[in-house]
Image (cartoon, rainbow, N blue to C red):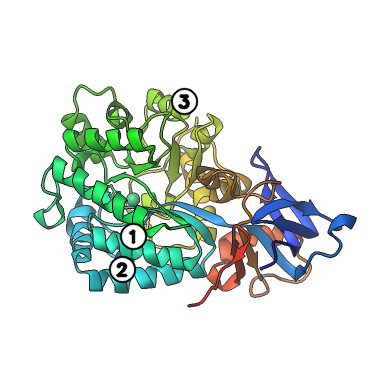
Amino acid sequence: MHSIFALKGHLIDCDHNKRTRFHPNSYLLIEQGLCVGTFAQLPDCYRHVPVIDYGDKIIVPGFVDLHLHASQYANRGLGLDLELLQWLEKYTFPQEGKFADLHYARTIYAAFCRELIRGAITRACIFATIHIPASLCLMDMLEQSGLIAYVGKVNMDCNCPDFLRETGAAQAAANTRQWLTEVADRNYRRVKPILTPRFAPSCSPDLLRRLGQLAQTQHLPVQTHLSENLDEVAWVRQLYPQSPHYAGVYAQFGLLSAHTPAIMAHCLYLQPQEQELLRQTGTFIAHCPSSNANLASGIAPVKRMLDAGIPMGLGSDIGAGHSMNLLGLTAQAVACSKLLQRQTAEESALSLEEAFYLATRGGGAFFGKTGAFSPGFAADVVTLDDSRIRLPGETLAQRWQKLFYLGDEREICAKYVAGTPIRLQA
Ligand code: GUN
Ligand code: FE
């Protein structure tokens, strides 16, 4: 690929106020993997750069999935008539236990990566399992794909079946250090490790403390679950009666702080003090509307938390979420927030523009300047051919709306990550 080139088409992205910007028939100029800017006409000094002309196609920033479990890929769509804690016991833990077998892991992770590559996602934050070889296998495959990802070897040492339990806090922390060493030896360019205590109930206080120390001393990012389900929240209150709230448990151990970037998946039932803690520390919420509906966890008050200034993006939460189609997930975020508004007078709904922001620029911010076509942003780009969907006479704004409700990977015809084209099919 040339170090400087332009893509031409109907460009659509978000500004920092979450408003959608439409640039019909325009050029996105890319230099050294970064956006230079959008132009109706290429400036004279760039007249000779190579142009890839996508004609009447729509060009949007790459979508960011802030929360999914690659190890649950085979389970998507299964057992979703249960609620969280029963679903974990009956379906999820037995499934994750199978990743002790590297051969099995390789098969499932290959299928997972194929679908990830084919879809609208350019960056993702992914849970693997407790198993080191399988987690490394997933990281190797992702590095090959050209996508950018954080991957976490999961930690859990209590309240889980023996076949999926690390034997004690010291051993669990040692496993994670060993995994980090092996990751460092591989010198990945695009895939990075992220500390991944599963959630407070499945980690002993000693393990949370050790992981918090690791996060602080090695400046590692953290991902976990927070306040997803009412039974889970009650359980954490029982386990940590001294803690003012669920988020306080992670904060107490250094896993939720201003010093290390962190993603908390779900956040449905946060107290005002917990929301304030997230805002003050710049901690991201991964909003997972499909998962929350499937497990009947409830509806997150996303509009309120977004307006409060808490960093936020979307998560498919495969396998509690059943689909990696981030276009559809964006529409579902709007639908869920409208249901909450219907139920609760003081909540308001997300607009589609705000949901598009969450799916691109909102989640992209976890990776730095990512998720928009502004100057200096990483050139993560998805090109969509909506000819299967569109009808004659539709405006660009109508075509853009319909993509979220009717579009899927069939519309995707090209994808770039930091200016590098991705091979959509292996
Ligand atoms: N809480 C702890 N583990 C999980 C998981 O695998 N999925 C979801 N949705 N919530 C969790
Ligand atoms: Fe999850």
Residue 280's disc is 3
Q: Give the quadrant of residue 418.
A: bottom right
Q: Helix or strand or loop: what does disc 1 sit on?
A: loop
Q: Which of 194 and 242 is in front in this view?
A: 194
Name the spot of residue 62 as percent of width and height, x first: 58, 57
Q: Give the quadrant of residue 392.
A: bottom right
Q: Earlier in the sequence, mark 2 or mark 1?
A: 2
56 relative to 92 in the view: left or right: right
- The answer to whether residue 158 is visible is no
Q: In this view, does 283 lie above or below 51?
A: above
Which residue bears the numbered disc 2? Answer: 74
Q: In this view, does 100 lie above or below 167?
A: below
The residue at the point 32 percent across, 45 percent down is 195
**Proximity of marks 2 and 1: CB atoms separated by less than 8 Å:** yes
The residue at the point 42 percent across, 40 percent down is 300
Q: Helix or strand or loop: what does disc 2 sit on?
A: helix
State how many labels appear. Answer: 3
Name the spot of residue 196 as percent of width and height, x first: 31, 46
Which residue bears the numbered disc 1? Answer: 319
